[in-house]
Image: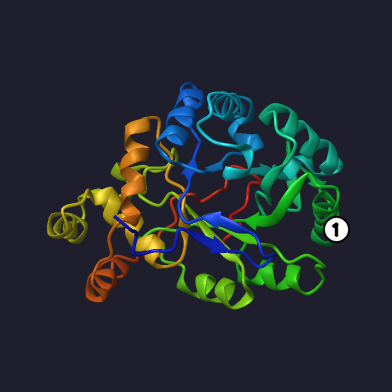
């Protein structure tokens, strides 16, 4: 059965990427097998990061899948990220990431957080400013270490700053995006600038989600359950389908390969416009990943 959505998106640098991917944060103990099985089931977009401490394990899964003939390297879209404390030697960090992933290049390298100083035992430590960091990111493209460069957790103000001086535009912005945090203004701005949004925590099951504390349980929302019954899909597929319809690439993470196979089924149907509006109506502007532990401030304030 053909999908009502495109198979891939064309990016602002002329390359393409899949419309759905898989996150790896928080499943380190089984991630090698999960990556292998997910590739076997059709996943082609994999998102990892230095701070997830999973690049080696993700690389092992990719290496085995390629060796077993499940795919070719060029079939995959592999993402990793630079941690904000590691900006002193960006090219060195890139090389270490490639060594752990056992790859010659990644498809996308992201600046993980728009934080350019941090606190260590109360002492303020300065990192490289954005314009210096981005110039080094551009060199990573020129040297063939990555095909695309982008950012993560950047708001409109940070993006406007970056766009005022960059030579290579960011291809992606990876942010928390789900029905409880429908960042439409950010989405509209990125679409206008040709920047593709990747949405993490798309079904609100991230490692930092505390359903009891927040009182928000997306998969138990009456609207989500009602639509799941109407379209004969799971609540998770409804949530992911809503995000795909927004033009955002969801990267649900799971430790269960069979769940990722289910997630891929979220591209096989389209809901009525009124039903998408019902899901959008769940917006609470609620951010689960309120990152205050590091650098000790609320960057989304």
Give 189 or 47, whichever is nearer the viewer: 47
| Residue occupying the point 73% across, 66% down | 169
Classify 37 as above or below 192: above
Q: Secondary structure at mark 1?
A: helix
Q: In x, y percent, where is residue 39? A: 47, 35
Classify 100 as above or below 224: above
Q: In x, y percent, where is residue 137? A: 80, 53
Number of residues whose C-alpha sits closer than 10 Å to that of mark 1, classed few (under 14), some (14–19) or many (20 or more): some
* On-image quarter of the C terminus: bottom right
Residue 217 in sight here: no
Give 35 or 219, whichever is nearer the viewer: 35
* On-image quarter of the N terminus: bottom left
| Residue occupying the point 72% across, 52% down | 147
Is residue 122 toward the left or the right of residue 193 in the image? right
Classify 115 as above or below 70: below
Give 192 or 160, whichever is nearer the viewer: 192
Q: In x, y percent, where is residue 184? A: 46, 72
Is residue 207 toward the left or the right of residue 129 in the image? left
- From the image, tell me which residue sits under label 1: 135
Residue 2 sits in quarter: bottom left
| Residue occupying the point 51% across, 43% down | 44
């Amino acid at each position: 059965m053909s999908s009502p959505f495109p198979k891939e998106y064309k990016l602002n640098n002329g390359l393409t990427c899949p419309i759905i991917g898989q996150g790896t944060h928080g499943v380190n103990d089984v991630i090698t097998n999960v990556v292998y099985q997910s590739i076997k089931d059709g996943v082609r977009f994999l998102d990892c990061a230095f701070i997830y401490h999973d690049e080696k394990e993700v690389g092992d899964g990719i290496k085995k899948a390629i060796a077993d003939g499940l795919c070719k390297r060029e079939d995959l879209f592999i993402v990793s990220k630079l941690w904000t404390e590691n900006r002193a030697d960006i090219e060195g960090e890139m090389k270490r990431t490639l060594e752990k992933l056992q790859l010659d290049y990644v498809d996308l390298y992201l600046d993980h957080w728009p934080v350019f100083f941090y606190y260590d035992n109360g002492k303020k430590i300065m990192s490289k400013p954005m314009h210096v960091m981005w110039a080094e990111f551009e060199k990573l493209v020129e040297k063939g270490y990555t095909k695309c460069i982008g950012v993560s957790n950047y708001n409109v103000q940070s993006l406007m700053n970056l766009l005022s001086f960059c030579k290579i535009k960011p291809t992606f912005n990876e942010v928390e995006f789900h029905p409880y945090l429908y960042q439409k203004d950010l989405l509209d701005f990125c679409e206008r600038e040709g920047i593709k949004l990747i949405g993490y925590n798309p079904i609100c099951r991230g490692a930092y989600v505390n359903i009891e504390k927040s009182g928000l349980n997306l998969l138990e929302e009456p609207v989500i359950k009602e639509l799941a019954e109407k379209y004969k899909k799971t609540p998770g597929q409804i949530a992911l389908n809503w995000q795909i319809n927004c033009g955002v690439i969801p990267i649900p993470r799971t430790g269960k390969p069979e769940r990722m196979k289910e997630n891929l089924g979220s591209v096989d149907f389209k809901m009525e416009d009124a039903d998408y509006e019902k899901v959008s109506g769940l917006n609470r502007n609620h951010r689960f990943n309120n990152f205050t532990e590091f650098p000790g401030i609320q960057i989304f304030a």
